[in-house]
Every structure is written in C-alpha cells, then in structure tokens.
Amino acid sequence: MKNRLIPAVLALFFASNCAFAQSTANATGIQDSLSKLSSKIWKQKTDSSRLQANAVFFKEFQSALETSSSTGITLDSIAGITRIASEDGKIQIFTWNVPLSDGTNKYFGFIQNNLNSSVVIQLQSNTNNQAGFDSKQFTPQEWYGAIYYKLIEVEINNQKAYTLLGWDGFTANSNRKFIDIYYPDKNGNIVFGMPVFKTDKGIKTRVVLEYAEKANMLLRYDYQSIMVEKKKKLKKEDAWLIVMDRMVPMDTSMEGIRKYYVPTGDTYDGYIFRNGFWTLVENIEVANKLNLTK
C-alpha cells in the first residue's frame, strides 16, 4: 500500500511545482510587458505625449490587476511603479508620477482591496493645494496625489487602518512629504485622512511637511529611543515610531515660507502611536543614526 502511495505523492509534488513555475512565468511576462509600457511614459518629451503614454499604461495595468486577483499573481516589480502592501497582502497600493513641464506632477495609482471581495480602485490626482489641506478628508475620486512608500497597520476604535508615508514633488521650488491614514468607513467607502494626529498645532487629519526642492528630508518608520514621562519622571523608552528631520528656514527672515525650509541635520522629531492617536514627540534621541537614511 505504501509503495502505491509514493508515485501519487510524487505526481502531486511535480504538478504543484509545475503550477508554481507556470504562475511565476506568467507574472514575469505580465510585469515585463507592463514595464515596457510604463517606461515609455518618462521617455516622452512633451506633457501631452507623457499623459497619452500614461493613459495606455493605466488601462493595461488596471486590466492586469483585475486579472491578478483571480490568478493570485503578485505584480510587484513594474518599472517606475511604487508598491506598498499590508502584512497579509490583502491591501496593495500602487502609485507613480508623471512630471510636467511646469515643475509639478500628475499622480496616478490603484488600490487593490481583497479584504472581502476583490476590488481595484482608481487613483488620479486632483488639486492638492487647498486651504486647510491638513484637516480635510478625501475619497479616491478627490485624491490629492502622492507616491506612497510605506504602509503601517494600526488599529483605531477597533478598526484596522493603514498609515501611509508619501512624497509629492509639489512645485518647481518645493517638495512635500505626508503622513496620512487610509481606511474603509462604516459603509465600506474608502477615505483618506483621519483626525488622529496630535501635532503642535492641534489635532490634524494628516501631517503635511513642505520643504526646499533641493533638500532631502527624512521621514521613515524606525525603532528608536524616546523620553517619556512616567510617574512624573522622564524615562527612556525604545519604540517604533515615525521619525522625521526637524525642518528650519535657511534664514530667519524666511520663517514660515516653507519652500526655504531644510533639515537641521542633527535634530529629529517623530510621531508615536498611542491609544488610537499618532502623537508628536520632539527632540528624539536617535540611538541608531546610521540606519536613518534619507
């Protein structure tokens, strides 16, 4: 009986390996094809031709994402496309930019949501220079535009939410970085922004950090040391938090004009997640500075 089982087990083993190899080959082929299309976007010399090439790629990418949901293929290596994902892989966010001749960018992307049923949500940027931008909530149709490079899963009011770190080539003279929240509301609708950021200017829906175009600003999730108050005494605590450069004007006469802000180079602030809020922590004692790359 045992001898009869061995061929069957071997057949199943080889069949599984063949299926895996075929799936990998399919994923590679699809990604190579999409990479050829995406690469054409940034080779174009005019705004109209770049946007036209992007429209072709956008359509093909959406079709591939919708197909990948049923085939299990992961599209994670497409030229020029930034992908972030939840730990369980059920949320994927893809973003990229199309640079324009005036120094600004148009942003595009997709959210692939496989939490309950498979849904692919389009992202195409609208204006992101609104008054009170750090206090507004947006739907995917109102998306402000950014390249997201980090996703941090948190739980707020017994609901899973996703903290996003992102970059925006805002104008010809300045860039911006964001800390934002993405989550489904009680009706299942997708929302960007949640009033959970305790800043030095009150509670905000997102953190917006503008700085000089030629500067490099650190904004990353890292394990560092902070000083916390316990029983009216300050004690050092190691924790995961969002670490960022302290930004200052190049000259005191430029105070408040964010396009002239640069890092101090030796002072760091951050946001730590506690009791459902991201809370500002100033003057972080950076214990692992060598890992804080820009």
Image (tube, grey):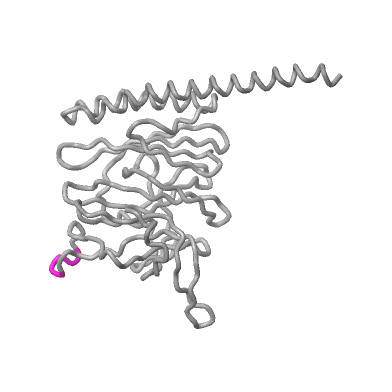
State yes or no: residue 255 in magenta.
yes
- Near-viewer residue (227 or 93): 227
Q: Is residue 87 above or below residue 36?
A: below
* Residue at the extreme left of the image, as rendered: 253
Point 34% across, 43% down: residue: 147
Q: Is residue 149 above or below residue 61?
A: below
Residue 164 in percent (x, y) is at 41, 49
Point 41% across, 32% down: residue: 77
State yes or no: residue 234 in magenta.
no
* Corner quadrant of residue 62: top left
* Residue at the extreme right of the image, as rendered: 1
- Near-viewer residue (70 or 197): 70
117 vs 111, left or right, is right
Quadrant placement of the N terminus: top right
- Near-viewer residue (205 or 88): 88
Residue 84 in percent (x, y) is at 44, 41
In this picture, which residue range is highlighted in magenta? Answer: 252-256
Residue 162 in percent (x, y) is at 47, 49
Point 57% across, 24% down: residue: 20
Majority SS type along the magenta span:
helix
9 vs 55, left or right, is right
Point 35% across, 57% down: residue: 207
- Near-viewer residue (190 or 241): 241
* Residue at the extreme bottom of the image, as rendered: 232
* Corner quadrant of residue 133: bottom left
* Corner quadrant of residue 201: bottom left
